Image: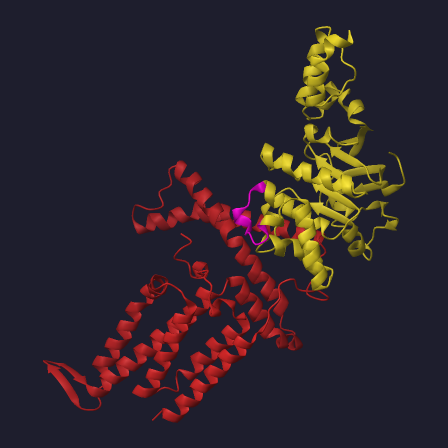
Chain colours: A red, B yellow
Amino acid sequence: MMENMLFGRYVPAESLLHRMDPRSKLLIIFFFVCIIFIANNGITYAFIAIYTFIMLTMSRIPARFLYKGLKPVIWLVIFTFLLQLFFTQQGTLLYRLGPVKIYEEGLKQGLFISLRFLFLILMTSLLTLTTTPIEITDGLESLLNPLKKVRFPVHEMALMMSIALRFIPTLMEETDKIMKAQMARGVEFSSGPLKERIKAVVPLLIPLFVSAFKRAEELAVAMEARGYRGGEGRTKYRQLSWKTADSLQLLVLIALTVLLMLFRS
Amino acid sequence: MKKNPIVSLDHVSFQYEGHEQYALNNVTFDIYEGEWLAIVGHNGSGKSTMAKLLNGLQFPQQGEITVCGIPLNETSIWDIRRRIGMVFQNPDNQFVGTTVEDDVAFGLENYGVPREEMVQRVQDSLHKVKMDQLLHQEPHHLSGGQKQRVAIAGVMALRPSIIILDEATSMLDPRGRAEVLDSIRTLKSEKSLTVISITHDLEEAAKADRIIVMNKGKVFQEGTPDVIFAMDEQLIQLGLDIPFSVKMAKALGKQGIKLSKYYLSEEELVTELWTYRSHM
């Protein structure tokens, strides 16, 4: 159950990307998502392809994990490609079969847009593959810190996220337990018509919710007993350290941006 | 043993909102520095309410509670919570951090302890409960007993004078229970820690220096385990179960085998029995 979940996708490995500061990784992804739209011809796409490829190799993530991450979205990529291919009617006609006409521009657009899509997915999944969810939370908290000035509850959001992450396996275990208990009472979760199956989820969700609320209450009491009273005056145990590699990575990305600007048509 | 009281309850009464009965009714007693006090009673006897009152999770309607010489009120609770550590019943629902070390650090973070000191204290207190090998472990990979030991480490990292175990072993298997109680015993012998264990398990209470039996919101009886277990039938009427060794000693007594004292731990009982003839 856990394996195909987005947040459980962290793959431990010894690589530069794994050691990087989550803040720099978040910034890189954010900028990458922006600058990918600068690319509009073969050469600029080639730059992006090379960059993505280098990042993927540096992460030392086995290809099968990347493939696993791609599998659910690959059809969307193909669909986008076909949509562009058949419905763009500009440029010279390349091929014709009955009512189906394929134009040069269509092929180009289809290829570019689906590639852009592919690179975006690869780069963002690289973030979750090389960074633990808690590191991402810490990174976000640190990056969003200036928002405290406008009373945005940054600390509370981060704490909520980390508690949610901590309780995912606990609640999963509980779901499993309740499911077995209900199955022992004759509830069928995996067979029967769809309507029945949806109905069968109700006796699963209600006990789960009841217990989650009870847990929340007990947790709140335990936190208070340990002196929690909001983010004021709190120190942090977990530390982020910005290293030279992080700055270098950002510089590389800036260089890429410059290249893209120069070579775009 | 009897030294200065570290906690005193003075005519304390507490009533939950919307309840007619008092959860605690005019309770007065002292807890002494460095002792291991067990508060026993069946469900609804007011023992858990007591724990909540002691560190200001609830406030009494009448009476006064003093902890380490500080009267407990809205303004002093944070100071008092730092002195009283609490370990709760459910191992999962008090684990805040995503890993063992983060959880131990949680309390320290709350009190703004500088990071270098935090690292040191996290290490130290995990070492004391023998969990320092599992620093980066996530909670769902730990057993109940291990989680409770992490909770103890989290409490100890704040260097409290008092530790309250609120049914802390009731959800554990016998092994986990032994691990937790061993950790507490070691900590207690190293520091002058006052332990208050709230429990319905008389086996656990038997290890305490003193026992307070609660019933219907009142102190029913207090005394050493010896005195309390002599109450015998009364304890059963209160819904408490007498330890096996006590039952055994009683049955032996009926057979005319008199033992040196009323309450004996299992090991003591065994020793007493195999040396029985040599005493005759």
Residue B95 locus on image (x, y percent): 61, 50
Q: Nearer the viewer, residue B209 or B69?
A: B209
Q: Quadrant of the C terminus of chain A?
A: bottom left
Residue B129 found in image quarter: top right
Residue B141 on the magenta segment: yes
Residue A24 locus on image (x, y percent): 53, 75
Read off the magenta span.
B134-144
Residue A56 locus on image (x, y percent): 39, 71
Q: Nearer the viewer, residue B34 or A155?
A: B34
Q: Residue at x 55, y 66 (%)?
A: A137
Residue A119 on the magenta segment: no
Q: Is residue A74 left or right of residue B227?
A: left
**Residue B217 visible in rendering:** no
Q: Residue furthest left?
A: A98
Residue A31 locus on image (x, y percent): 47, 80
Q: Is residue A58 left or right of residue B24?
A: left
Q: Nearer the viewer, residue B162 or A171?
A: B162
